[in-house]
Amino acid sequence: MTEAAPERPKLSVRGLDFYYGEHQALFDNTIDIAPAKVTAVIGPSGCGKSTHIRVFNRIFELYRDQRATGQVLLDGQDILAPAFDLIELRRRVGMIFQKPTPFPMSVFENLAYGIRLHYRPTRSELHGRVEAALKAAALWDEVKDQMQRPGTALSGGQQQRLCIARAIAVEPDVLLMDEPTSAIDPVATARIEDLVVSLKERYTIVIVTHNMQQAARISDFTAFFYQGRIIELGTTEQVFTAPRERRTEDYITGRFG
Amino acid sequence: MRSVPPARRGDRAFRLLAAGSAGTVLLLMAGLFVALGAGAWPAVRRFGVGFVVSNTWNPVTERFGALSSIYGTLVSTLLALLIAVPLSVIIALFLVELAHPTVARVVGGAIELLAAVPSIIFGMWGLFVFAPYMADHVQPALSKTLGFLPLFTGPPLGIGMLSAGVILALMILPFVTAVMRDVFRMVPAVVKEAAYGMGSTTWEVTRGVTVRYGAAGMIGAVFLGLGRAVGETMAVTFVIGNDHAVSASLFAAGNSIASTLANEFTEAAEPLYRSCLVYLGLVLLVLTVAIQAAAQLWLRRILRRMGRSG
């Protein structure tokens, strides 16, 4: 079912089950995520796509009744093992949410927040890193003169790029994006899509999207989820032009979903 | 006169009624100031603004000054806030961020019940249980350890400014905590997730995001507590000692504006004496209105700075 990635996968998921209380949401998920590529996760609402990527940084652990079993290997190490350093995991695996989540502080402090959590930068290092991250997120030119403005005062698209900048400021390996453009207008969406493509040189990106054109435009691999199971994973071209599974074809041709 | 259809007549009547009811609020407010101002006028004419800085209070010679009452009001209120606010923040954070939902529900319910306890109960408890305990245990211990500060000197009587401050703190604690809890609850879960997702610990999320997000609301909660504490009468009157004295020691007896009013109106037979008490009431009213106004201005400023419409 899974296609062997050419290199060692960045993330290898083996037999992942997930539960909300008694309710099982993911069933025996097994998937490899290729490094320095964009992997799109598509599927109808409630199929477990978000749930699946929320395991990669163990953010689900904030909620008492949520539980994951199985193996998720990041560079060969099982992140679900209790011994795995959670703080370091979350530095290495950043997350962008459906709605922009600027912190209630200035643009500069939004960026500095994460850097200060994980590093002990000097003043000039801090400024350098903030600038580099904003440049990488294609936001620098727009905000360089308003670093002291509240992050919440930016436009929606800018806020989302701010969140991406904030995530990459701590030098992660993986970026998880949970429908990052669903709350953003089409022009701003296009900019974020360009940004995602430009970021994949340095980061492994997993993006959940309900927008199939988006998946087709920006991803290298596509995984199709249905009812908590991974139905198909392949190159985006193959999944969209020659799906192996009937349900994949039905979904991408709009027969359900 | 044009004839108006009955339905529209009803609308008009309701409109008038509603506007009139709303206008009552303004009238009431203005009326309070006017009535107190008129009542206080003889005292104002006699003592002027010097009333609020003079510390004489002698009904026999008819020399009156409000300093000790104002001082006592401010000190007991400040003490109450110093004790209650940090506690409220911690309790509210515990309820929202840390506690098991069942625990949060039980403790949260208890806090709301505490808010419903009449102040006379706090006063009686303060006088008969708490003040003796202060005198026997807390004040001697404070004298021994911090006695080098003038704040903690003098005989441990139990009754006095410190006890009033603590009782006030207990009384405003539930209100402040309840508002703080609601403030922290309003922080969007996804913003917290984002902060945790950056690799923050619970403490870092709380300090860096939750508390900042709630800053405006927290200040609102503090002012709510302040407003309650400034005017609180019954409990304070029981434990503050009711002495017209300004003392550096928190062990000493003092009074507050409200306690003075509660204690002395029945004895105030002379017109000037009574007028002075009304003047004192006017000071209290101005004080509380000023606090409210400051609170609202402050809140508006914070909200603007946080980039939200307020």
Image (spheres, coloured by chain):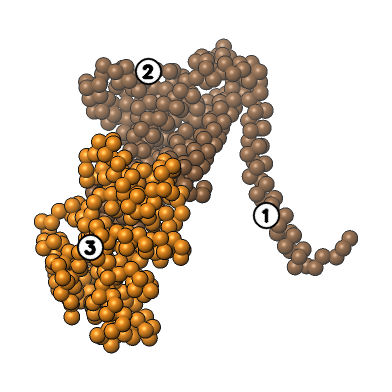
For numbered disc 3, what is the local secondary structure?
loop
Residue B21 versus residue A102: which sits nearer the camera?
A102
Vertical relation: B197 (above or below) A120: below
Confirm whether circles 1 and 3 share one chain: no
For numbered disc 2, what is the local secondary structure?
loop
Residue type, mark 2 in image: Ala
Check disc 2 and report the residue beneath it. Answer: B248
> Which quadrant: the N terminus of chain B?
bottom right
Confirm whether circles 1 and 2 share one chain: yes
Name the residue located 32 percent from the left edge and 30 percent from the top edge. B131
Name the residue located 24 percent from the left edge and 28 percent from the top edge. B137
Task: Report x, y in % for residue A38.
Answer: 27, 66
Check disc 1 and report the residue beneath it. Answer: B18
- Shown in orange, the chain is A
What is the spatial separation of the Cα atoms under label 1 and label 3, in whole angstroms? Answer: 66 Å
Task: Report x, y in % for residue A28.
Answer: 17, 76
